[in-house]
Amino acid sequence: MNTAGFSMDIETHIHLDGSRELLTILPNLHRITHGTAREYPFNQYKWSEHLDQVRRWFGNPLKGDIVKKFSLTTGVLQNSDTLYLAAYNFTTMRARKGFRYCEAIMAPQYSTFGGLTEKQVVEALIMGIKDAEKSYPEIEVNLLLAVGREVSPEEAVRLVGIYSECDRDYVVGVTLVCDEAKHPPEKHLIMYQTAKERGLNKACHVSEWVHDPEAQEADLKRDLPQLMKNARTALIDLGIERAEHFRILGYSAELMELTADLNVGVTMCPGSYLSTELIRDVKFLRIDSLLDRNLPVSLHSDDDLFMPNMSEMLDHCDRAYKFTDEQKFKLRLNAWKTRFGKRKPVPQDIAHLLQ
């Protein structure tokens, strides 16, 4: 099939608190939260250097305390006003960029330090989305609510219970995020059982990293057995419908067959893996082979506030793989097929393929 250029109108693996859309409003969110009591950390730099300074702040997010690094954004997303503005701006800017559908990943547990409950966090985000969609009705933005896997299994169950009571037109599922090496997926089996009972769609950040990034470099030969074990656990025991990352899928015929049989979508983030030094070349992912096997793989940016955005990542992958028009179309179609939300009509050129 012929497609003009290589762009995406859908993204289902983008963290709201790590999105490029925050860049323009981050100083204002800081002022709303802290007033004059705390100076915005990058005020001394020219605005043209803002993105570079934010990128330096995060560096390789896997090295050091990832939760502390994200406090640059989560630290100002602690009240209804800033949460509303973040969601409103995300939806507005994404619509202006031509996106028709986005699932924004957000872990409410990191936005409760200012006194809000997790449910109030979600309500503020949804209000921002709703108001933005009034001006841009062509876009659909939903929330994929996350649990930071460092919490106890009991706390994860409590959080999922709260998420299930939020507006289910906008809360389309749950996922597990952060340190997979220290907190493998089996730790939160009960959380996923609860999500299934509550009728929530289930995703999981899995098979991303299982080594200590502070002490070791990623090594496929060393890490592959544990990465595969985590993948099997997520697919079989957690019963996920979408695997987030799954960067070693192309190295296991067993996992490819299992993913296909279970019809599990796969959201890969090549720019993220380069930024975190999990891979050195996007061809490591064998995306072309996965597409040729008709596996439901799609490409996403992950945290484009400090990583490559969608356009940059797609251009990089296209140069490496020299995708055919059919492969480009499959990447877009796979994202639409494996989305969780369905509040609005899909683009006409693919509607007949999604029935």
Image: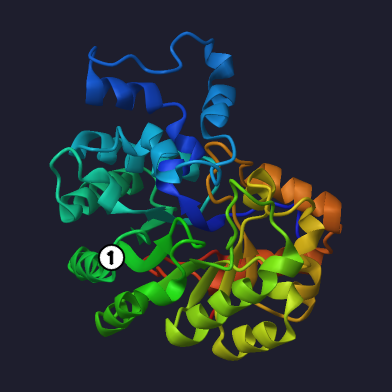
Give the number of callouts. Answer: 1
State the residue position of label 1.
152
Left or right of 71 in this view: 38: left
Q: Residue at x 31, y 83 (%)?
A: 193
Q: In the figure, is residue 20 to the left or right of 300?
A: left
The reply to whether residue 2 is visible in this rendering is no
- State the image coordinates of residue 55 (x, y, percent, origin top left): 57, 31
| Residue type pointed to by label 1 | Ser
Q: For the point 81% across and 59% down, which residue is it?
A: 283
Q: Is residue 19 above or below residue 217?
A: above
Q: Quadrant of residue 161?
A: bottom left
Tell which of 284 and 91 is nearer to you: 284
**Label 1: few (<14), some or many (≥20) within 10 Å?**
few
**Which residue lies most toward the front here?**
215
**Front in this rendered view, residue 138 or 319:** 319
Which quadrant holds the N terminus?
Answer: bottom right
Q: Residue furthest bottom?
A: 261
Q: Looking at the picture, how far across and down is residue 103, in whole percent?
A: 43, 58
Q: Quadrant of residue 159?
A: bottom left
